Amino acid sequence: MNTAYLTEDRLPTGTRTGLSSLDALESEAIHIIREVVAEFERPALLFSGGKDSVLMLHLATKAFWPGKVPFPVLHVDTGHNFPEVLEFRDRTVERLGLRLVVGSVQEFIDRGDLSERADGTRNPLQTVPLLDAISRHRFDAVFGGGRRDEDKARAKERILSLRDEFGQWDPRNQRPELWNLYNGRHTVGQHVRAFPISNWTELDVWRYIEREGIELPGLYYAHEREVFRRDGMWRAVGEVSQPRDGEEVLTRTVRYRTVGDMSCTGAVESVAATAHDVVIEVAASTLTERGATRADDRISEAAMEDRKKDGYF
Amino acid sequence: MTITDFQTATLFRFATAGSVDDGKSTLVGRLLHDSKSILADQLEAVTRTSVERGFGGSASGEGQGQQIDLALLTDGLRAEREQGITIDVAYRYFATEKRSFILADCPGHVQYTKNTVTGASTADAVVVLIDARKGVLEQTRRHLAVARLLRVPHIVAAVNKIDLVGFSEAVFRDVEEQLLRAAAELGLPDVRVVPVSALEGDNVVELSARTPWYTGPALLEVLETLPAVDELENEFEAFRFPVQSVIRPQGALAPGLDPEPFRDYRGYAGQLASGVVRVGDSVTVLGSAAGTQITTSVAGIDFAGTSLPQASAPQSVVLRLSDDIDISRGDLLVEAGTFAEASQDLHASLCWLSPKPLREGAKVLIKHGSRTVQGLVRSIKGWLDLASFSEGPAADLGLNDIGTVQIRLASALPVEDYERHRRTGAFLVIDPVDGNTLAAGIASGVPDGEGEPRGG
Ligand SMILES: Nc1nc2c(ncn2[C@@H]2O[C@H](COP(=O)(O)OP(=O)(O)OP(=O)(O)O)[C@@H](O)[C@H]2O)c(=O)[nH]1
Ligand SMILES: [Mg+2]
């Protein structure tokens, strides 16, 4: 039989062999991770201990089994960490036998190469140490856990995103990206950011975490915490995050939807204690994860695009 | 959003196309909005921007004052919002009880055709928007030609802004006829036509009372029921597997594994490009070394510690083979007896995506599957005239041109006819100097070596 063209009478009628959407997303991500490892000399994976980076590392372990993950992980440390996330990061790196490279925002501030922002958040300050680590370690490809459903600028970015000598993204001049043939060619000084989970939604991520039994830092699940209200979010009381006058400290049962700079990441009230509970909660949520929990994304309408143009994740 | 049936829900990818301002982004916004995929903070942000920019008031007077510019849900770049146009593809995600959708909202402007080709290359369906007042335009024809070239399995045409022509059946039938004529000229097999108002929602998610003469399904229902590419291909195409890398874990075994069973482990990592493979199947290795062909059998299919009895496209797995053969990245494994031969001569259509024109004698790189080889463009055989859909002679190919070429390769590649094998018939043309992607390549006129594919 010739399969020249699919016409109406030749559409399949019998059983469908289509993969479930989660299996299809997993397979696509693994394909991308393997392509990048095969075509680049010095890849690295951005690893913060947050759920998207944990998910990527999990996919990488599956991609190369029974071999070990063949690249180091890179953490751009804001110095404003949740202690349990750092502890989780170190434990994971140890368990998988990986090399950890850290770029430290604090060191740049201490040296006077970066200055603290008026609003105190350090997420936007990560760009400089990130680019410094990339050039110092001569990484030519960096895996990021960015997802297109997170933000309207991310929704526009290619899976392999070419960055110039300054790490800048040029959204008006992206390479075509055709089929599943990824073109990673770049010239000296350029590098590529690779986003294998571009096509996953927050809900996909949680369904997959549930299905695979992936361990996450405890703060993704409901726990009691001392918090205060700011900008419509619950902020944890911690070293870098202190209530101001008039902000009352309360004990609430909360969880985090994203973990970033502790000074600008908010918690949501939640009783979701397991991945399954979170799946149900996310499916019913009326707010996006960034809208609910990230003060830094509220700075302007194009906050993410502007940061990416400067070399951000 | 919904979580019903997520174990079985399949993934369906579609892209928008059509001329500038025909309403692609508005339609996408409408689909997201009416399928309740827009969350409160996104809607609030878009409403705020709409008000700031003075958007509102529809021609038919519905929903006055309440209107939001739905295109802002996907036009996420600063420049897009300022100019009110789409520049690059936006990917959005939504799910119904039946399906998870990946939606690529593409630009209509001719200058950004390369981005529309990007969005359409992975699509199971293209939704072509046509302004009911304007009918089929040159850019509509270009996008239909691109969809035909890429062999997108389904075309759904949305005759939009039906509110602006008084929900007239006569206007709709006229546009429908123009469209079906163009589709027939191109040989597009599966075209469905739906009258819609993206702005006001008629026939997008729910059937509209304002078009009683339309008796077909609403657009979303069409999209929910079309079969996806992989579902189609699995039943028809033979097994193809480009080897991405060789997994030999000796010395770098994943922590926690007992080294004993893996002492001689050698597996081939890749993603099935098409078909099904089962343990015990005879497969032929098309080697990159001097066109070698060796047949062996599949000893095992591994995936992250699990042994699978079979795998189907587009699964990513690791295959083990019965014989110790020298296989490396770039080799292609195929179902035995289903492949003619690798060739150094490549006859293909190109969709030229670069401002740098293609001339005869150009040296390029060809990326096919997991291999990249040098190529020399021997001749440019023709250029597709969009007005007549006929091919005329051409000395060069410029930005957004579609043409046919003859390329001589530095070493033989197992390229197949794209019409029959979408994945192994596709390739990239890359600039050897700056590494940019110059064209989407679609092989044609390759002799078919495929025998009868096995049933089910
Ligand atoms: N009355 C009416 N106006 C519409 C309809 N659909 C879109 N429009 C308007 O048409 C204009 C263009 O809409 P867009 O959705 O931005 O068009 P587009 O096809 O995405 O444009 P590009 O992406 O730049 O090619 C906007 O002003 C829309 O509000 C419709 O069904 N009825
Ligand atoms: Mg648009």
Image: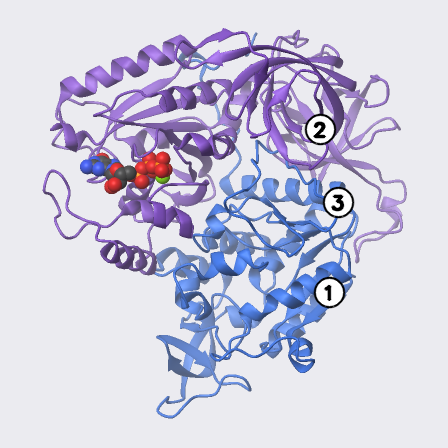
Q: Residue at x 44, y 43 (%)?
A: B90
Instruction: Give the residue pinned by disc 1.
Output: A93
Instruction: Give the residue pinned by disc 3.
Output: A40
> The disc numbered 3 marks a residue on which chain?
A
Q: Residue at x 50, y 66 (%)?
A: A258
Q: Where is residue A218 in the image (x, y as percent from the top left)?
A: 56, 71
Asked if one can make out residue B64 in the rendered structure from this viewpoint, the answer is: yes
Q: Position of residue A32 (x, y in %)?
A: 64, 42
> Seen from this angle, which residue lies furthest bottom?
A245
The answer to whether the residues at label 1 and label 3 have Cβ atoms under 8 Å apart is no
Q: Which image quadrant: the C terminus of chain A?
A: bottom right
Inter-mark Cα distance, 2 to 3: 18 Å
**Mark 2: amino acid:** Pro
Chain seen in purple: B
Give the vertical position of A27 relative to A98 (above or below).
above
**Mark 1: amino acid:** Val
Tell which of A78 and B319 is nearer to you: A78
Label 1 CB less than 8 angstroms from ligand 2: no
Instruction: Give the residue pinned by disc 2.
Output: B242
Q: Which of marks 2 and 3 is in front?
A: 3
Q: Position of residue B70 (x, y in %)?
A: 28, 46
Q: Which image quadrant: the N terminus of chain A?
A: top right
Local packing at callout 2 (Cα closer than 10 Å; few below 14, some 14-19, many 20+) is many
Local packing at callout 1 (Cα closer than 10 Å; few below 14, some 14-19, many 20+) is some
* B412 to the left or right of A247: right
Q: Where is residue B395 in the image (x, y as percent from the top left)?
A: 59, 12
Label 3 CB less than 8 angstroms from ligand 2: no
Q: Residue at x 54, y 7 (%)?
A: B393
The hue of chain A in the figure is: blue
